[in-house]
Image (cartoon, rainbow, N blue to C red):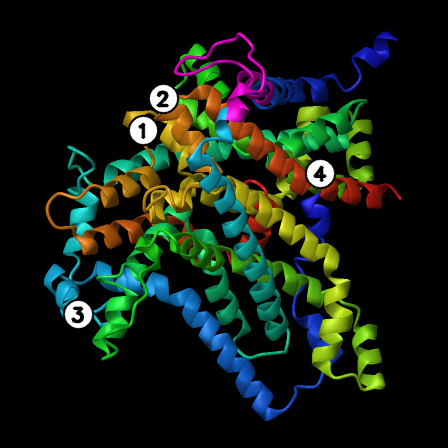
Amino acid sequence: MRQVAIGGVLPQTSAGAKARGRGRGSPAGRIGLYLFLTVAALFFAIPLLIVAATAVKPMDEIRQGTIFAWPHAPTLAPFAKAWFSACTGLYCQGLHVGFLNSVRILVPSVILSIFAGAMNGYALSQWSFRGANLILTALMLGAFIPYQVMLYPLVKIFSGLSLYGTLPGIVLIHVIFGLPVLTLIFRNFYAGMPEELVKAARVDGAGFFRIFFRIMLPMSKNMLIVAFILQVTGIWNDYLLGLIFAGRENLPMTVQLNNIVSTTMGEAEYNVDMAATLLTAIPPLLVYFLSGRYFVRGIASGAVKG
Amino acid sequence: MPALAIRNASSKAVLLPTVVVMIVCFYGSILWTIYISFTRSGMLPSYSLQGVAQYVRLFHTARWHTAFANMFIFGGLYIVAAIVLGTLLAILMDQQIRLESVFRTIFLYPLAMSFIVTGLAWQWFLNPTMGLQHFVRSLGWESFTFNWIVDRNYAIYTLVFAAIWHGTGLIMAIMLAGLRGIDSEIWRAVRVEGIPRWRAYLRIVIPMLRPLMVTCVVLLAIDVVKSYDLVIAMTKGGPGTSTDLPAKFVVDMSFERANIGLASAGAVIMLIVVLAAVGPYLYFELGRKNR
């Protein structure tokens, strides 16, 4: 439904605005315009810049200076410490443990959830049957429900299946919670494809799976990119599900980051904390900067997932 | 007819696991939680019903009152601010500006970051002894005070700042897409009539985007009810329990305080709030489509 509301208008570019040829307004107005945009840009940029600046400062520079002071003797030592030896509780193995856990959770979760979502969307749109709409509506509602409402029973169910606190368990949880949104966006995407395509393939004797793998999947590149962005950022940034379902051995990077910052032995090492924060933010930021316009579509279609 | 029974059999087989997961994990879990909320469950689940006692207890719990009220303070301010600022930025971005993609990149990047990272960045920025307050004092304004994050009366508002920082870009992007979708005939008419541009936005264009704005409000409202990570990273619910939110209350009660009955009652209230926000929207949205 969100796709209906938002997705339809998102891919538009500024071409429309240019063709419209609106007036540019007074010079004073233009200056005010840029001034406001610049102030807004500063508001959005400053927190990250401060995190980055703090991360490369030695501790005594942090103590003596201010957060806005330019780093005089930049050092990468805080990053090394955050990565290799920062402590969470009694363990001092560094953030790389959480990074590897997050990768181990991310890769299977992303692949399986996108595959399941694409397959579901294809089945619901091109091979529809009585009850298909009911399934879709029920899934859509599921996308709105806060995790807290399902958390305790899910823990019980997963314990019963011996999946609670395991890597397959957290992967399955991500796949399950990815189903509503992914099924929805792929269904809307496949529903927009020409019917003749599938009809012709069926006349030629191709079956359900053959049409999916040979025709639909290769044509879904854009949607796959959107789903990929949505899932990579969503799963990488997840905290709650990882905290509860992953188990102590598999805690993702966000959980470990929060533990590192909360663990203070002696004086807090703000530079190490901020280096750890930056390191955790880098993977989704990379996805953001590399994906450009796809990112907005991905986030907009996943906003419901939270 | 046997032929019909196996029609689209592959399709049904593919959807079977999803349907099972949906019934068991989503709706089964929701019903389970609702049921538990009416039992005497404490540390362990109990299945003997005792009516609404957990809800009575919940609404006599001071911490829940704080959490529930915070959801509306935090949510109300965040939603209004994000919509106003996001729409304003979208309008400014629609004035054929230079460096549009640079501005867009800056406004949108916080969306890529987790709420944990967002919360940690902001608690550092607002840290009274090291952050913004210290900086302004170092400029010579010795009496400058901005210690909201450690003040139990004001800490909830710092969460609003961080949330605005994280979410405004999305509203800007959605509203900008809406603005670009406005028929150019309307702008031509505005020019012919000689209506000032700001009035055209206020009286004609923004009202046209109202459905999109409603979508934004619903999206943000769901986010607010779900808000958990941001509080954890920024204030841990403190000072005291002054920045507690229902989402945190429920998780703490389920997993730390082992008070499952109370947690379930809180979760059901969360569900009701979400349904109250989403229900009318879905009703009208689906109604419009069917018309």
Image vertical order of residue A71 relative to residue A265, above or below: below
Q: Locate the N terminus of chain B and report the quarter of the image it occupies.
A: top right
Q: Which residues are magenta?
A: B30-56
SS under mark 4: helix
> What is the distance, in whole Å, between disc 4 and disc 3 at their CAs?
52 Å
Q: Residue furthest front?
A: B60
Residue B252 placed where, x, y %? 39, 30
Q: Is residue B204 above or below residue B43?
A: below
Q: Which residue is mark 1?
A: A250
Q: Name the image quarter holding residue A71.
A: bottom left
Residue in view at x 65 percent, y 18 percent: B16
Q: Is residue A61 above or below residue A103?
A: below
The amino acid at mark 2 is Gly
Q: Secondary structure at mark 2?
A: loop
Q: Which residue is mark 3?
A: A65
Distance from disc 1 to disc 3, alpha carbons, whole Å, reads 38 Å
The answer to whether mark 2 and mark 1 are in CB contact below 8 A is yes
Q: Do badges 2 and 1 share one subunit? A: yes
Residue underneath mark 4: B279
In this view, B145 is above or below B219: below
Report whether mark 3 lies on the same chain as mark 2: yes
Of tags 1 and 3, the one toward the viewer is: 3
Which residue is denoted by mark 2 in the rendering? A165
Q: Amino acid at mark 1?
A: Asn
Give, as a three-letter code, the residue at label 4.
Gly
Label 2: few (<14), some or many (≥20) within 10 Å?
A: many
Residue B195 in view (yes/no): yes
Please check whether the numbered discs 1 and 4 fall on a single chain.
no
The chain identifier of the residue carrying mark 2 reads: A
Residue beneath the point at 49% across and 58% down: B164
Of the residues shown, which amino acid type is indicated by label 3? Answer: Gly
- The picture places residue A207, in percent across and down from the top left corner, at 72, 24
